[in-house]
């Protein structure tokens, strides 16, 4: 069987801000059409990785490829094949929801921008709010619009940087459903999160970024095997990702 | 350069013009102060000022317009700063578009919104007795100089909008610019000023621009002053543009 083509391939990525070394040799790959979760605590460097992949920031060394294009050598081709939903909703509060969508459609040279906007508003349950200024939207509505804007032009690779941070549980579930339906259509998704539960729920593979490197990278099943098997308690229980994370991070810190 | 630079810039212009038209109060804020100065100088100080002119409103008009533009561009800095702070700037930069269109959208919007302010002030001036017999060519020259002046200050505003870390920083740079016309020939002839002030007033850009605009409005010969005025505007424009692009490249590096 042939291995699926790689949508994202990162090797030996280093990045410092001044004297602060944030990435100290990050390696990972994401198969086309899969959901990959980059997990790490606040300040681990997740956003830094995403910004390098979306050509907003240049790495100090190492290589990063998206859809087979090098982020440094072919940034325009990379931008053709990605969409970024940043950590903070990147919507225009003065425009209406519909105008935001039409703006992105026009920038991406998508035909029938009005039709595209209409369909996306419907799909993200924003039809009624579509004519209102985004300034009046709730956090969940803004996030949905933000993600909708990222889907225009059907980019094959989507980066979602902490897409559910700050959302209430209901809005979080809506975003999760949308991510799953996207992946179902073959879009590759790189998701960053601080929520172990989120990675556990959505991702095909999970990598933990800690102190500048990827300390674990595997499927949820593989990650579970890193812990001693579930103990036979009154009710048998699998270790949660949280327990795995704490165990690995704890071991690593104890050793270093 | 991307093939879609004009189409992209059009979308950006459209967006930021909506920002202007949806906060029309900013046009009022921008025009109210120059109009207040015009009223103050015309009706309070005007009687006492010896400007050697029979229509003091005409005399005031060029300086008032420059004050309006100098305060108008602070909103250009403000709008750009807001884009930098919100994620929208990064969204645009991660999209397959001509990146330069992001800045040019703001520059063109600055030209449009300042043109609106200028027209509003000229209309108020007409009500106060402003009259000009200038012909089409002279008006074209006036428009050209005002556009060049707006462009030059707009690129100064772009530096502030790109480099600032607070809203105040993005707008406060315009305060000294607003007061420059007071130390020029805009309201009183420089001949009445004491030595050092006079030397400054006669050699700063506003005086040559004001004198040129005044000559054009009054159908007087502009002499070499027009070239001094154009050189000042072009010089400021080029230096500000280079600094703004440097700041921009540092920001997106
Ligand atoms: N522009 C910057 N200048 C200096 N330090 C930065 C900058 N951006 C991020 N950092 C620092 O780099 C580290 C990683 O940041 P980030 O990639 O945003 O982490 P995460 O997204 O995982 O929370 C943090 O310690 C942060 O303070
Ligand atoms: Mg982050």
Image: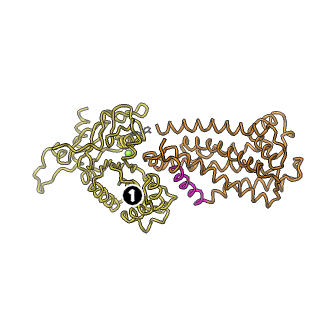
Chain colours: A yellow, B orange
Q: Quadrant of residue B26?
A: bottom right
**Residue at screen point 76% across, 59% down:** B124
- Is disc 1 placed on a helix, strand or loop? helix
**Magenta span contains residue B14:** yes
Count of numbered circles on the image: 1
What residue is rendered at 46% in x and 36% in y? B253
Residue B30 visible in the displayed image: yes
> In the image shown, does A88 or A103 lie closer to the viewer?
A103
Residue occupying image coordinates x 73% and y 53%:
B34
Which quadrant, please, contains the N terminus of chain A? top left
Residue furthest out toward the left: A232
Q: Is residue A54 left or right of residue A181?
A: right
Q: Which residue is mark 1?
A: A148
Q: Residue furthest bottom?
A: A128
Chain of the residue that carries numbered disc 1 in the rendered image: A
- The reply, left or right, for residue B1 in relation to residue B23 is left
Q: Specify few, some or many for label 1: CA neighbours under 10 Å numbering under 14, 14-19, or 20 or more.
A: many
Residue A242 in percent (x, y) is at 24, 48
Residue appearing at x 33%, y 34% in the figure: A63
Q: Is residue A75 left or right of residue A238?
A: right
Report whether residue A193 is seen: no
x and y percentages locating residue A82 in the rendered image: 37, 47
Viewer-closest of B33 and A229: B33
Q: Nearer the viewer, residue A177 or A110?
A: A110
**Magenta stretch prevailing secondary structure:** helix
Which residues are drawn in magenta? B8-23
Q: Quadrant of ligand 2?
A: top left
**Spot occupied by residue B90 in the image (x, y as percentages of width and height):** 45, 46
- Asked if residue A22 lies in the magenta stretch, the reply is no
The image quarter containing residue A254 is top left
Check the picture and name the quadrant holding the C terminus of chain A. Answer: top left
């Amino acid at each position: 069987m042939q291995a699926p083509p790689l949508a994202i391939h990162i090797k030996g990525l280093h990045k410092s801000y001044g004297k602060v070394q944030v990435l100290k040799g990050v390696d990972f790959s994401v198969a086309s059409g899969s959901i990959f979760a980059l997990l790490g605590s606040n300040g681990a460097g997740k956003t830094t990785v995403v910004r390098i992949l979306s050509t907003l920031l240049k790495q100090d060394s190492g290589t990063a490829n998206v859809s087979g294009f090098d982020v440094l050598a072919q940034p325009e081709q990379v931008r053709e094949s990605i969409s970024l939903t940043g950590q903070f909703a990147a919507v225009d509060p003065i425009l209406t929801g519909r105008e935001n969508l039409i703006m992105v459609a026009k920038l991406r040279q998508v035909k029938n921008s009005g039709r595209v906007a209409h369909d996306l508003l419907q799909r993200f349950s924003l039809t009624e709010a579509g004519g209102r200024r985004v300034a009046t939207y709730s956090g969940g509505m803004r996030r949905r619009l933000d993600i909708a804007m990222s889907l225009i032009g059907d980019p094959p690779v989507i980066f979602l940087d902490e897409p559910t941070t700050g959302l209430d549980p209901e809005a979080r579930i809506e975003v999760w459903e949308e991510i799953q339906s996207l992946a179902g259509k073959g879009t590759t998704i790189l998701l960053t999160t601080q929520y172990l539960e989120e990675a556990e729920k959505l991702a095909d593979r999970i990598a933990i970024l800690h102190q500048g490197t990827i300390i674990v990278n595997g499927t949820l099943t593989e990650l579970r095997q890193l812990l001693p098997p579930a103990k036979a308690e009154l009710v048998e229980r699998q270790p949660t990702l949280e327990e795995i994370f704490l165990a690995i991070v704890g071991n690593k810190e104890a050793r270093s | 350069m991307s093939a879609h630079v004009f189409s992209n810039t059009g979308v950006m212009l459209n967006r930021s013009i909506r920002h202007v038209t949806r906060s029309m109060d900013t046009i009022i804020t921008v025009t109210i102060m120059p109009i207040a100065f015009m009223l103050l100088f015309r009706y309070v100080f005007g009687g006492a000022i010896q400007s050697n002119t029979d229509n003091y409103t005409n005399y005031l008009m060029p300086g008032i317009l420059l004050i309006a533009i100098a305060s108008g561009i602070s909103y250009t800095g403000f709008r750009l700063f807001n884009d930098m702070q919100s994620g929208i700037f990064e969204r645009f930069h991660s999209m397959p578009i001509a990146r330069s269109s992001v800045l040019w959208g703001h520059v063109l919007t600055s030209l449009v919104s300042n043109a609106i302010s200028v027209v509003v002030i000229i209309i108020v001036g007409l009500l106060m007795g402003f009259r000009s017999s200038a012909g089409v060519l002279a008006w074209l020259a006036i428009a050209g100089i005002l556009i060049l002046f707006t462009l030059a200050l707009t690129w100064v505003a772009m530096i502030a909008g790109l480099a600032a870390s607070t809203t105040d920083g993005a707008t406060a740079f315009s305060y000294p610019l607003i007061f420059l016309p007071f130390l020029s020939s805009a309201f009183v002839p420089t001949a009445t000023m004491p030595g050092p002030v006079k030397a400054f007033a006669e050699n700063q850009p506003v005086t040559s621009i004001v004198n040129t605009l005044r000559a054009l409005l009054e159908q007087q010969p502009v002499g070499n002053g027009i070239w001094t005025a154009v050189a000042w505007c072009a010089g400021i424009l080029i230096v500000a543009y280079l600094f703004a692009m440097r700041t921009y490249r540092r920001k997106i590096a």
